[in-house]
Image: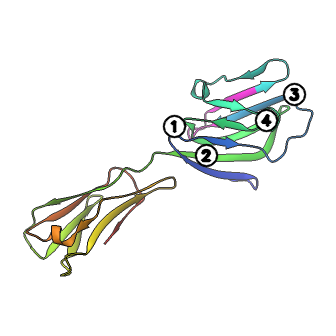
Amino acid sequence: MFHSLDEEVKKAVGEAVCFRTNRIDPPVSSIIWKHRNSSGVLANAIEWDVDDGVSIPNQRFKDITTLDKESGEIAIHDLNVKHSGLYSIDINSKEQEHRFHFEVLERVPKPVIKTEKSSNPDRSKHHLKGEFITVEKQGNPENFYTCTLENAVSEATSDPVCERDLFNGKTVINVCLGKYEHSGCHL
């Protein structure tokens, strides 16, 4: 459930992210950044208090997480999908209203268009997520086709395949997409 001070943030695996609360009122004696994963498990990502200094109690955040005790900003480097979830901050043992819904995504791979034999020399088929897309010969050997995969953090486009290469015999085009849902074929 989103609240008025919630932010949605998306990053790619391997990148870094910083979260900062809107305000921090001195004096501050403790800061705790909490992480709730998609299963609902709550863990403290990083903690600081005046007496004990900084501690990182959860192994998932060790050696990649820092805290600026003046601003309350948390920085997490070398992200992986396990860092996805809801982040909230407690200042002086009081949960703040500002929260971050965070998702770490894999970068999409570069799609590859492959050709195979076809029975009709004037038609070609694109294989897209288990389905074939039929491409008709347009008569212009300079026409080309590409396939683009994209998600919220990345985009990759196949090398172009020219019509002259597709219809120089009997071929079918197979587009290898992998497991990514956000895709499109530009014909």
Give the residue pinned by disc 1: 80
Q: Three-letter amino acid code at disc 2? A: Phe
Q: Locate residue 140, reporting x and y percent.
A: 21, 80
Q: Mark 4 points at which residue?
A: 90
Could you tell which of marks 1 and 4 lies nearer the N-terminus? 1
Q: Is residue 137 above or below residue 185?
A: below
Image position, residue 132 (x, y; %): 23, 65
Residue 138 picture location, percent across and down? 21, 81
What residue is pinned by disc 2? 102
Instruction: Identify the residue at horizontal 44%, vertical 48% (top origin).
Output: 107
Q: Quadrant of residue 176?
A: bottom left
Question: Looking at the image, is mark 2 or mark 3 earlier in the sequence?
Answer: 3
Q: Is 40 in front, or is 56?
A: 56
Residue at mark 4 to residue at mark 2: CA–CA distance: 17 Å
Query: Against 63, is 118 above or below?
Result: below
Q: Where is residue 84 in the image (x, y as percent from the top left)?
A: 57, 41
Badge 4 amino acid: Asp
CB within 8 Å, label 4 to label 2: no
Question: Which residue is found at the position 70% from the left and 28% from the top?
Answer: 46
Magenta residues, as a range?
Answer: 36-47
Tell me the distance, in whole angstroms, between the alpha carbons under discs 4 and 3.
11 Å
Pointer 3 or 1: first along the chain: 3
Q: Earlier in the sequence, mark 2 or mark 1?
A: 1
Q: Please identify the quarter of the rendering in which residue 37 is found.
A: top right
What amino acid is found at the position of numbered circle 3 in the picture?
Answer: Ser
Question: What residue sits right under mark 3 in the picture?
Answer: 29
Q: Which residue lies furthest to the right in this view?
A: 27
Q: Residue 68: within the magenta?
A: no
